[in-house]
Image: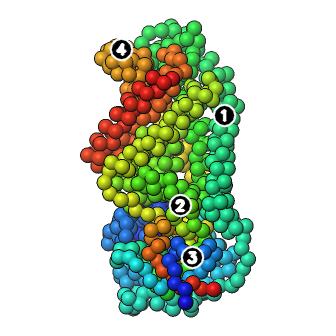
Amino acid sequence: MEKVDLTQLEEGESGVVVNIQGGYGLVRRLDSLGIRVGKKVTKVSSQFMRGPITLRVGNSHLALGFGMARKIFVRVVK
Amino acid sequence: MKKILLMGNPNVGKSVIFSRLTGVNVIASNYSGTTVEYTKGYMRLGNEKVEVMDVPGTYTLEPTSKAEEVAVEMLKEGDLVIDVVDATNLERNLNLTLQLLKDGKPVVMALNLWDETRHTGISIDVDKLEQILGVPVVPTCAITGEGIKELVSELPFAKTNTYEYEEEKRWEKVGEIVSQVQKITHRHHTFLERLEDVSIRPITGIPLALITLYLVFNIIRFVGEGLIGYIFEPIFESFWAPLMMRLSNLLGNQGFIHDVLIGKLVEGQIDFVESLGLLTTGLFVPFAMVLPYVFAFYLVLSFLEDSGYLPRLAVLVDNLMHRFGLHGLSIIPMMLGLGCNVPGAMATRVLETRRERFIAATMMAIAVPCMAQIAMIVGLIGRYGTGGLGAVFGTLFIVWIAIGIILNRVLKGESPEIFVEIPPYRFPYPTALLKKLLMRTKSFLREAVPYVLFGVFVVNILYSLGIIQLIGRITAPIITGILGLPQDAVGALIVGFLRKDVAVGMLLPLGLNLSQLVVASVVLTMYFPCVATFAVLIKELGTKDMLKATLIMIASALIVGGILNLIL
């Protein structure tokens, strides 16, 4: 089973969140917008030079900074 | 009086429902965080008058940002909650709903954006949802007004619900509910969804952003110039001018009253820009020079806001804004600031930290001229070709970047990262767009025209009392020595505190050459915000930070103005 952080996920690839390596504050912020352990996310795009990445979660799109994305680990879903 | 609160996630249409319920128009757009301050309105419920409050959006009742704190704080005051829910995002929205229900206030749910469930292949069993939650659920489409009547008629039946769940199992509960009431059918991607992907991938998104910028610029120019050339100037020249000439003759072509009302005649004729009378320049500047561009700008801005493009632009420019210690969303206050610095300053609230808000507000106040001022600069310098305009706006752009980089270096602290929901593209609803455009145009007229008239009046008084001449002599070392402008230019700097557009207009009778006009335009933009912006900035930043920002403004205006004077 391949486990990567969100910055390593390819565009168009999906993954199930397995771990968020961040403090309570970050976990809560992510949680309020629907990103939590067990949730399936799909990467839509990434920007040049460590820019933000965009994800599809459920029916909504979210943009989050590179640093945040690096703390979210997913198991890749084929 | 009973208080009804409109609560829900950001960008689910609370403000649109608020306008429908109360008849009070508020700005609504297609991105999170349009409403940064609560708005109050009133409606009739049976024989009772009740207060309705449009609360800033929140994802949770455990606040993670300042705007969310406001929302949670306000919940305590409410007697009844209309929980506005995005029907296309049921799961995430129900998370807040469950928290609201637990809070114990009577709740009615508005299942908004109902029309969009159809083409997104989502079907929701409303009766079942109502049964599970134990509160009334009404499907609505606020923008067209569908379901609003039903929503109002359900308000008396709002219930405190008895729905029980353990806090740690909230998402589980949400999942259970969703699986019981929602069915999703597969469907093909629509054109707008394809466009969503294209506009956020850098390879296609950046060219698209440049094309958009180019179009925006040209549409504003086309509409603005068209309105001036074909409507406003002809009205003033062929209708208003003869009338004013007659009044001028009646008043004997001179004297104090004549000068205040009509102004000084230029070669025996009224010159709408130079005469500086209340009824001539005082009306010509706001209506025939500024209004057309303000209208054109807000037409385009409103379209961009309602389409959902702005958050995507924020993602594309995120990298650039990090050089200034900001993140991508700070492009929104800058864009709004181009219309008027006042809403721009308010919009800095979308940023998380004090440091970010200080940097963004200072950058905007110094280097982002408002549309009124831009229109006047274009009117004044545009006649010398595009070179002068390029010098003014090019300089301001460089200053904008430099101020950002310097502030980021000097101020301690880190810059948070962007974390925002990207709304789906929506085709702007024409009636809503038109309403928003009219609202902004009206508010411009209501706020600008009195200030312009007052500004023109003050100029007349100050000149006739010799005060401007006196201050001019005192400040000559700066105005003439550093900036290379005639002493009288100090009059423009004084009036610039009231209205920057009038101030730019006052440069015309001074007979400046192109280089001096460029220096004066840049300095007028940078040296100080107008009084309206100043008041809002004090409120947003606090007196101490505003004092700091003011010192930065004055210092940078003198430095940049001095350098321009040397090299031009």
Check disc 1 and give the amino acid type.
Answer: Glu
Residue drawn at x 57%, y 66% is A46
Marks 4/1: CA distance? 36 Å
Query: Residue A49: which disc?
Result: 2
Q: Chain of mark 2?
A: A
In this view, the mark in front (4 or 3)? 3
In this view, the mark in front (3 or 1)? 3
x and y percentages locating residue A55 in the rendered image: 56, 73
Marks 4/2: CA distance? 55 Å
Q: Chain of mark 3?
A: A
Image: B29 above or below B115:
above
> Badge 2: few (under 14), some or many (20 or more) residues near its Cα, within 10 Å?
few
Residue carrying label 3: A9
Check disc 2 and give the amino acid type.
Answer: Met
Check disc 3 and give the amino acid type.
Answer: Leu
Q: Identify the mark nearer the N-term, 3 or 2.
A: 3
Marks 4/3: CA distance? 68 Å
